[in-house]
Amino acid sequence: MPEHPDHLWYINQGLVRTLTWNEEGDLVTLGLWGVGDCIGRLLSEVTPFQMECLSSVEIKPLSLSGQDLGVVMRSHLRYMEELFSIISYKRAPQRLLRFLDWLGDRFGRKVEQGRILDLGLTHQLLAEITGITRVTATRLLNEFEREGKLMRLPKQQMLLQFNSSHPDRVTSLARHRAKGKRK
């Protein structure tokens, strides 16, 4: 995506990741942004800084100042804080599960059984963002699927079923499947 220091980009469609990298060359995700979000160099003091399209993206330039810029900055800060608090979990299963829950809340489509994530995120990208290896991400996703916490759908989609009254517990899809078979 083009970087312009004097204006932001408004996302009409798609998913964008803002990122940097450390001295060892490891990628560090600063945020994930979707429809309705504003992104741009103007919102970051981090160097290096890059915006990466994770899907087909439609954007339009947006010039903001004053109060409007403050609203965008607070929104940006809130999502970044949420992401950083998730990444701080020490145990990989909890970190990945919390991240999937956050993705579901932020970008998922609600259905009766939970939330569908249609972001096309690869195991490698999930691993990069959560600070685990791709092998660990794959192993955990398989484990979550066996436990009924998620169901993989075609085209890299996932159905997530989280218990909203207890965000660290996931409601088993197995119970939903069992109810459907009894009808």
Image (cartoon, rainbow, N blue to C red):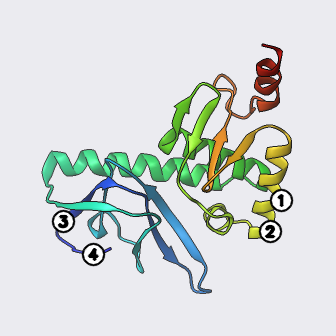
Q: Residue at x 76, y 24 (%)?
A: 176
Between the C-alphas of marks 3 and 1, the distance is 42 Å
3 above or below 156? below
Mark 4 or 2, nearer chain start: 4
Select label 4 or label 2 by which is in front. Answer: 2
Name the image quarter holding the N terminus. Answer: bottom left
Q: Which residue is mark 1?
A: 139
Q: Residues within 10 Å of mark 4 (few under 14, many from 20)?
A: some
Judge whether residue 51 can be spotted in this image. Answer: yes
Q: Residue at x 61, y 79 (%)?
A: 26
Q: Amino acid at mark 3?
A: His
Q: Judge left or right: residue 85 versus residue 173.
A: left
Residue placed furthest toward the bottom: 24
Mark 4 and 1 residues: CB-CB less than 8 Å, in contact? no
Q: Residues within 10 Å of mark 1 (few under 14, many from 20)?
A: some
Residue 172, image x, y percentages? 79, 30
Give the total of numbered labels: 4
Select label 4 or label 1 by which is in front. Answer: 1
On residue 71, the disc is: none
Q: Judge left or right: residue 4 versus residue 81.
A: left
Between the C-alphas of marks 3 and 4, the distance is 9 Å
Q: Which residue is mark 3?
A: 7
On residue 135, the disc is: 2
Residue 107, image x, y percentages? 48, 44
Q: Which residue is mark 4?
A: 3
